[in-house]
Each structure stands twice: as structure tokens, then as C-alpha cells.
Image (cartoon, helix red, strand yellow):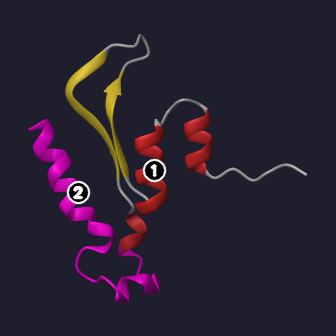
């Protein structure tokens, strides 16, 4: 029987995510990474930012625990954007 791999596990296995990005994704559903081109060149002051849009889903009952910034996603996003500003 094969083991089911979620998106995060597949992305990590394929080299898209490093350990820190993967841990953030597993815990919160969002992550960021520096943009790297196919030739390996890093693009300065540029990031790929993936947000967890399930925090806006009105049937997500976990929102009742933290209505204003579930998983501190908005605070995290502000920090990420400030770093590349």
C-alpha cells in the first residue's frame, strides 16, 4: 500500500520547499520563499508568497477561536512584505 502524500510533502520531496518553509506550511497553511530562477539565480527583493485562503471560508469553524487574524497570517504577511520593501 502506498503512503498518501499531501501537497506539502510532494513540494518538499521535489525540492520546491526547504525544511523551514515546509514546517511553516504544515503548521499554518501559508509560506514564503525567495524567488529563484531555473538557472539558480536568486531574484533580489522578490518572494513567492502563498496564503491560506481557507481562513476566509465561512464554514471553517476554527475561525471562532481566532476571528481577527487566524494563524497570525495578516501579521506574518505584513512582516514578509516589509522585508522585501
The numbered mark at residue 23 is: 1
| Residue at 16% from the left image edge and 46% from the top image edge | 81
Residue indicated by mark 2: 76
Q: Is residue 58 magenta?
A: yes
Please state the extent of the stretch shown in magenta in the rendering. 56-85
Q: Residues within 10 Å of mark 2 (few under 14, many from 20)?
A: some
Give the quarter of the figure containing the C terminus: top left
Q: Is residue 48 magenta?
A: no
| Residue at 43% from the left image edge and 83% from the top image edge | 62
Helix, strand or loop at label 1? It is helix
Helix, strand or loop at label 2? It is helix
Q: CA distance from mark 2 to mark 1?
A: 15 Å
Majority secondary structure in the magenta region: helix
- Check the image and name the residue furthest to the right: 1
Query: Which of disc 1 and disc 2 is earlier in sequence?
Result: 1
Q: Residues within 10 Å of mark 1 (few under 14, many from 20)?
A: some
Amino acid at each position: 500500500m502506498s503512503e498518501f502524500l499531501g501537497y506539502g510533502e510532494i513540494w518538499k520531496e521535489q525540492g520546491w520547499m526547504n525544511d523551514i518553509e515546509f514546517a511553516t506550511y504544515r503548521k499554518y497553511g501559508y509560506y514564503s520563499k525567495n524567488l529563484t530562477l531555473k538557472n539558480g539565480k536568486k531574484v533580489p527583493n522578490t518572494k513567492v508568497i502563498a496564503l491560506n485562503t481557507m481562513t476566509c471560508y465561512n464554514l471553517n469553524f476554527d475561525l471562532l477561536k481566532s476571528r481577527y487574524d487566524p494563524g497570525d497570517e495578516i501579521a506574518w504577511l505584513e512582516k514578509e512584505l516589509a522585508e522585501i520593501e
